[in-house]
Structure formats: structure tokens, C-alpha cells
């Protein structure tokens, strides 16, 4: 289907307002955590400002606006005020598994009224049922929007695009879908039973919509058909909260051109900070060269002053060395710096028949059979501390890690 008029909209999702930010591997100080929470909760304001400045005719939000049902009412009020400021342009919301639309939640007008809160603004269209529904696009009879809502946080095993919802007969037909793309490979990718509402890239392309706005995964990813034509995308979360959300954050400006040409997708920066996870091998380096190598890693990675950074030090260092202390001045160069020391003291191979040798052999076997990086890290730590104990050296446990 073709249209004589292009359509431009902004897409964003997975804001997770109200996130506690007590994990994520960055070991935030209380001050930084409080400031970052405020930045997470400002996602709606940033999205509306970006939509207005880029000439978007609508804002599409396919789910997970907030993180859990215990998000403070003041945070929801901030969200509603931001959406209202976008009027008369519409906002389309398809609740996800975190901000599900069951009774008694913030999508429920009865609850908002009981709390003395303002209702959802008139320019906001919320899909409130679990079945697919089509709604018109205000002021555009050539556009229709289809969506649905999660009614609980439980994982959905049914495939939402098998079969797909009926495509409206309008030239532009938009679909809001919250769920798991099976080929998604981001660090937050759910596995096995943690997938919810699973679908394939072929199912997205085969649904026949002009655009499929996807939510649930936290890194941006465009889905294309077999000819390489974009047909949908995840915008990813707009505010990095932890190491699984490292890297630049974006809103997506999507234009459906006139005449049925392929959609045009543009990335708009969504966050002034970047979460960065860096690893540096500091084997045998003294203080000066060690600091210089880490600084060079910062430069190569493009680290800037507003960023939130974790540096993992690897390799060998003399027994008793504390290389993390050498990097304390670098904390003044960024908004937040967490240093994880995973260096090991050099040690000769133990005599195989000694207690140390047998212990080392057993722990290396455990490490070889580890199922994931976390189990390997536990085996490495047990090996280091055990050998120190067997050799009568002081036990130096690592600092607690915020994962």
C-alpha cells in the first residue's frame, strides 16, 4: 500500500522509571545513585522534547514505562505531565510485562482518581486489553495503529505473530509489539523460559505492517526483511542503568516516506551519559605505566567526563599489590568510576603430589566445567584464596562486587 503523505514519529520504550539501581555492576555511591535515578525518571521528558524538536507527529512507546508496581506516584505524575505537554500530538502506549495494565495499576483510572492524581492525558492512547486492537491516528485518516497490553508480569509463551493481527487497510499501518525477538543477541537477551511473547524476524516482516515498533530488549536493533528493507526495530532503553545497558542510548526517529519507499530510521541521542565496561590487562606493570595504560584505554573507548565507568584489571601483579588504588585519581575525570581488581599474583606451578598441587588440579577441573562466567569467577577466586591459605600467605578477599 502507498500513500501520498509521509509519516514521521519517534519511538522509545523500556524506560523502567522507578528503578532502584542497587545492582548492575557499577557500585554506585548513594549520591550518584540518587542522581541517576532522577535521570532514569526523566526519560518521558527527554522523549517528548526529542519528538517535538525532530518534527515527529507522534510518540510510540511499546511498553515497560516503569519498572514495577511500587513506583512512586510522583514519578507517574511526572510521566503524565510530560505526555500532556506533547498535545495535541498523540502518544501510543502498549503496556509491557513490567508496566502491565491489570486492574489496580497506574493505567487504571480508578486508582489514579483514588490517589488524587490527574488522569491519563487525552492525547495518550493506551492499549488496555490482551487482544489486538486497532485505533485511528488523530488527524490522519491514512494511518492506523494496532497494539495490545500485558495484563500481568508473567512470561507469555504464545507467539504473538503466529498468526499476526489483521493489518488495517490504511496506507500506513503501525504495530506496537512488546516481546522477545528470538535472534536478538544483546547482553540483556533472555534465554529459554525467560523469553516472553517470542517471535522471529521473519514473522515481523511477514506481518505486513508499515512499521513494527518493538519493546522489551534494551539495545537498539533494526529488523529487516529478506531484501534488507527495515520493517521494525527496538529503540532500546534510553538511560543506561547497569553494565548490561552499556553503550550509547538512543531514541528512533522513523519516517515512512511517500510512495511506499523503505522506512528511514535515524538515531537520536537519548542520554548525556554512557555506561562503559572496560577491561585492561596490567600484567607486571608498575604504578606509572599501569595508570598510562588505563588512561589510553579510556581515550580509545571515547570515555567522556559525564560517563559511568567500570574498569576491570586483569593479568598478574605482585602479591599484595593494590593496583586499584593507583587509579583513584581517574575518578575525578568521570561522573563515576568503579574499579574491579581481578589480577592474580604470579605463582610457579605447584608440585603435583603436594596439597597445593592436588588442590590446584581439582579447582582447575571445576573451572573447566563451569557453566558460565560467574561460576568461573568463583572458581578463580577459590583457587587464589586457597593457594594463599595453603602457602601461609595473608588472605586478601576481593572487594564486594555490585553485579
Image (cartoon, helix red, strand yellow):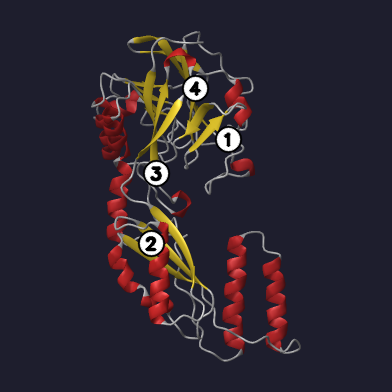
Q: Secondary structure at mark 2?
A: helix
User: Which numbered disc flags the more N-terminal residue, 1 or 3?
Assistant: 1
Q: Residue at x 31, y 61 (%)?
A: 334
Q: Nearer the viewer, mark 4 or mark 1?
A: 4
Residue placed under numbered mark 1 in the picture? 181
Residues at marks 2 and 4, CA–CA distance in whole angstroms: 38 Å
**Gap between marks 4 and 1, in whole Å?**
21 Å
Asked if the residues shown at circle 3 and circle 2 are in contact, with their CB atoms under 8 angstroms apart, the answer is no
Residue that label 4 marks: 262
Image position, residue 245 (x, y; %): 45, 49
Q: Estimate how packed mark 1 is, as few (under 14), some (14 to 19) or many (20 or more) residues with alpha carbons within 10 Å.
A: many
Q: Earlier in the sequence, mark 4 or mark 1?
A: 1
Q: Is residue 20 left or right of residue 316?
A: left
Foreground label between 3 and 4: 4
Quadrant assignment, res 3: top left
Asked if 15 appears above or below 146 in the picture, the reply is: below
Looking at the image, is 5 positioned above or below residue 217? above
Q: Could you tell me which secondary element the residue under label 1 belongs to?
A: loop
Q: Which residue is mark 2?
A: 299
Residue at numbered disc 3: 249
Instruction: Bin the neighbour count of mark 4 within 10 Å (Cα to Cα): few under 14, some 14-19, many 20 and up.
Output: some
Disc number placed over residue 285 in the picture, else none: none
Other residues around mark 2 within 10 Å, as few (<14) / some (14–19) / many (≥20) = few
The residue nearer to you, when weighing 294 against 322, is 294
**Observer able to see residue 312:** yes
CA gap between label 1 and label 3 equals 19 Å
Amino acid at each position: 500500500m502507498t500513500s501520498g503523505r509521509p509519516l514521521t514519529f519517534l519511538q522509545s520504550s523500556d524506560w523502567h522509571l522507578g528503578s532502584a539501581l542497587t545492582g548492575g555492576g557499577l557500585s554506585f555511591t548513594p549520591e550518584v545513585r540518587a542522581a541517576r535515578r532522577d535521570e532514569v525518571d526523566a526519560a518521558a521528558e527527554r522523549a517528548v522534547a526529542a519528538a517535538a524538536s525532530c518534527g515527529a507527529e507522534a510518540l510510540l512507546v511499546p511498553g515497560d514505562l516503569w519498572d514495577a508496581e511500587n513506583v512512586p506516584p510522583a514519578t507517574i505524575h511526572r510521566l503524565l505531565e510530560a505526555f500532556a505537554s506533547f498535545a495535541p500530538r498523540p502518544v501510543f502506549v502498549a503496556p509491557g510485562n513490567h508496566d502491565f495494565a491489570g486492574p489496580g495499576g497506574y493505567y487504571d483510572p480508578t486508582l489514579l482518581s483514588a490517589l488524587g492524581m490527574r488522569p491519563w492525558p487525552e492525547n495518550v492512547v493506551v492499549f488496555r486489553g490482551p487482544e489486538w486492537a486497532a485505533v485511528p491516528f488523530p488527524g490522519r485518516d491514512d494511518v492506523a495503529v494496532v497494539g495490545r497490553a500485558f495484563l500481568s508480569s508473567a512470561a507469555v509463551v504464545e507467539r504473538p505473530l503466529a498468526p499476526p493481527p489483521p493489518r488495517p487497510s490504511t496506507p500506513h499501518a503501525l504495530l506496537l509489539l512488546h516481546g522477545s525477538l528470538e535472534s536478538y543477541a544483546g547482553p540483556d537477551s533472555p534465554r529459554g523460559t525467560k523469553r516472553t511473547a517470542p517471535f522471529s524476524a521473519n514473522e515481523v516482516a511477514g506481518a505486513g505492517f508499515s512499521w513494527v515498533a518493538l519493546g522489551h530488549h534494551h539495545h537498539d536493533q533494526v529488523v529487516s526483511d529478506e531484501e534488507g528493507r527495515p520493517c521494525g526495530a527496538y529503540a532500546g532503553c534510553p538511560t543506561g542503568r547497569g553494565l548490561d545497558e552499556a553503550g550509547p542510548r538512543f531514541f528512533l526517529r522513523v519516517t515512512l516516506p511517500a510512495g511506499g519507499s523503505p522506512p528511514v530510521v535515524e538515531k537520536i541521542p537519548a542520554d548525556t551519559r554512557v555506561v562503559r565496561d572496560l577491561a585492561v590487562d596490567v600484567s607486571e606493570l608498575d604504578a606509572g605505566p599501569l595508570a598510562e595504560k588505563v588512561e589510553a584505554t579510556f581515550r580509545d573507548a571515547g570515555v567522556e567526563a559525564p560517563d559511568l565507568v567500570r574498569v576491570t584489571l586483569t593479568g598478574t601483579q605482585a602479591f599484595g599489590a593494590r593496583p586499584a588504588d593507583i587509579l583513584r585519581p581517574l575518578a575525578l575525570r568521570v561522573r563515576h568510576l568503579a574499579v574491579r581488581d581481578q589480577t592474580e599474583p604470579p605463582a610457579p606451578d605447584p608440585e603435583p603430589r603436594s596439597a597445593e598441587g592436588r588442590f590446584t588440579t581439582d579447582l582447575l577441573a571445576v573451572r573447566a566445567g563451569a557453566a558460565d562466567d560467574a561460576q568461573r569467577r568463583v572458581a578463580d577466586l577459590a583457587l587464589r584464596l586457597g593457594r594463599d591459605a595453603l602457602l601461609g600467605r595473608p588472605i586478601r578477599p576481593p572487594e564486594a562486587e555490585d553485579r
